[in-house]
Image: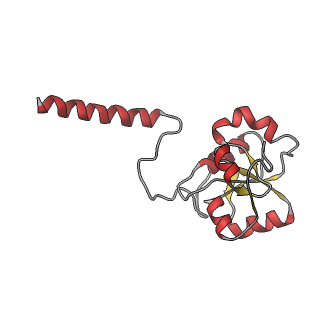
Amino acid sequence: MFRQAGFIFFLGIAAGLLCNHFRPAGLALTGGTTLLNEDATLPEGVSVIPLAEARKAYSSGRALFLDARDPKIYRSGHIRGARNLPVETVDEDFDQVMAGVAKNALLITYCDGAACDLSARLAEELYFRGYDRVRVLPNGWSRWKAAGLPTGQSDEAAR
């Protein structure tokens, strides 16, 4: 009986891991791993931007910041003036959010957390859609907020 229970237990674990592996937004199975930093390797055409450089681009008004997080999280706090383009709904929201944005505009994507890859995934999507000046701000929201830079809430600059 214990043998059968053990077999069913391990079969359940294997099935769960397999489902997680093939799920588009599968859960990370390792913790504390930094996926993005200023030395990160990203797809060709996409690069990391240091916080100091992102701050200068923001101050000069020469960049559009794109928040890759869920709309509810975006509304609770974001970089002031940023537009929300969640990577999970990019196909549905792209035309509305990116209306009037030139292909050669400087785009800076961000999300929150050292292990968050949403900004890199969004940056890659933008690059493949023809935007050639796409940068990723690693752990952007936390670092931006910690530096005391301008933030916004609610539906400001929303889609």
The residue positioned 83% from the left and 51% from the top of the image is 105
Residue 88 on image: x %, y %: 63, 38
Residue 29, compared with residue 136, is above or below; it is above
Residue 114, horizontal then vertical, whole percent = 55, 59
In percent of the image, x 73 and y 54: which residue is there? 153
**Image position of 14 with respect to 110: above or below:** above
Where is residue 95? Give x, y as percent: 80, 35
* Residue 43 appears in the picture as rendered: no
Q: Is residue 148 above or below residue 116?
A: below
Indicate the colouring scheme.
secondary structure
Q: Would you say 114 lies left or right of 159 here?
A: left
Q: Nearer the viewer, residue 111 or 135?
A: 111
Q: In the rendered view of the protein, which quadrant contains the C terminus?
A: top right
Q: Judge by depth and name the residue closer to the eye, 69 or 136.
A: 69
Q: Is residue 149 visible?
A: yes
Residue at 88% across, 42% down = 100
The image position of residue 8, as x and y in percent, is: 23, 30
